[in-house]
Amino acid sequence: MDIIDSIVLGIIQGLTEFLPVSSSGHLELGKAILGDNSVPKESLLFTVVLHFATALSTIVVFRKDILDLIKGILKFEWNEDLQFASKIALSMLPAVVVGLFFEEQLEQLFGGNILLVGCMLIVTAVLLFFADRAKDTNKKVSFSNAFVIGISQAIAMLPGISRSGATISTSVLLGNDKTKAARFSFLMVVPLIFGKIAKDILSGDIAYESTNFVNLGIGFIAAFIAGLFACTWMIALVKKSKLSYFAIYCAVVGVTAIIFVLLNA
């Protein structure tokens, strides 16, 4: 993997982590197009670095919200901040269960499964299409909503299902305020990303030998900058009900991926 590939994949990760078009699906498509032949352990290290970059960009964008949240939690009262943190913890449960007990099955779905990616991108398109037509409300995410949104997040571990698209769409379809839905969606994934990074590092499955750390650093910077832009932009798009554009994009890419597989079968 050269510097250009690192930049391209970093930008793809940074943009698609927040934009509702599936980061995992686009990384699979990107690797297939670029002809990434890196061994799994090397590829895992690069993926970990990119995910850390996007998690960091989320923290930067929501730094005020996170600081206020921490201050509220440290009051040790059942206030709005502690309730919000509890909802995030509740939303994490489905993904944690899937990640712990079905990790091997999930890994088998990656590695160039372009047909699956195409089909799941179409599912994402349908979700975005209906969410974009939901009515505006002032409703906050409830505890029951948080768990349902968490189930959507677990399903979005499939390549091609957009995590942000699935969680925001589910939240909006449950009647929640669109801006609050986007905020909850982006904050709920941060603990999971850091948990997954810690798990991958401690697992011993990452290869550090012969690693080009310059390329890793460039990929990190590209993903971080793209993530800052995409996260801020996505909040504005959700608020203005502009998800239909992404629905069209996901449908087109999904159909194209399916046609590509069928023509090369």
Image: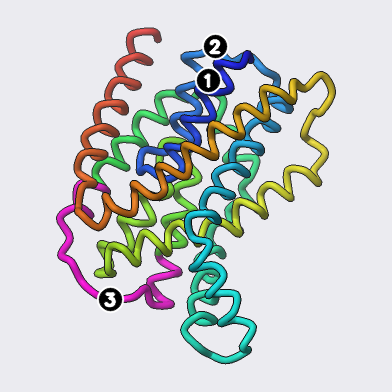
Q: Are marks 1 and 2 in contact (CB under 8 Å)?
A: yes
Instruction: Report the number of numbered marks.
Output: 3
Compared across the picture, whether 92 is left or right of 135 comes to: right
Type of amino acid under label 1 = Lys
Question: Dot 3, how many residues are within 10 Å of its Cα: few (below 14), some (14-19), or many (20+)?
Answer: some
Choose the circle earlier in sequence order: 2 or 3.
2
Mark 1, residues whose alpha carbon is within 10 Å: few (<14), some, or many (≥20)?
Answer: some
Residue type indicated by callout 3: Lys
Q: Residue at x 33, y 54 (%)?
A: 235
- The Cα–Cα distance between marks 1 and 3, rounded to whole angstroms, is 40 Å
Residues packed near mark 2 inside 10 Å, few (<14), some (14 to 19) or many (20 plus): few
Looking at the rendered structure, which numbered label has been put on residue 31?
A: 1
Name the side, left or right, on which 259 lies relative to 155.
left
Residue under the image location 25 percent in, 47 percent down: 128
Which residue carries the number 2 mark? 35
Label 2: state its secondary structure.
loop
Where is residue 124? Give x, y as percent.
32, 42
Spatial CA span between label 1 and label 2? 6 Å
- Mark linked to residue 139: 3
| In the foreground, 202 or 82 | 82
Q: Residue furthest top?
A: 264
SS state under label 3? loop
* Residue 222 falls in image quadrant: top right
Image location (x, y in percent) of residue 68:
53, 75
Name the amino acid type tagged 2: Gly
On whether residue 145 falls in the magenta region, the answer is yes
Asked whether residue 174 is drawn in magenta, I would say no
Q: CB under 8 Å between callouts 1 and 3?
A: no
x and y percentages locating residue 41 in the rendered image = 73, 28
Mark 2 vs mark 3: give the one in front: 3
The span picked out in magenta is 128-148
- Quadrant for the N terminus, please: top right
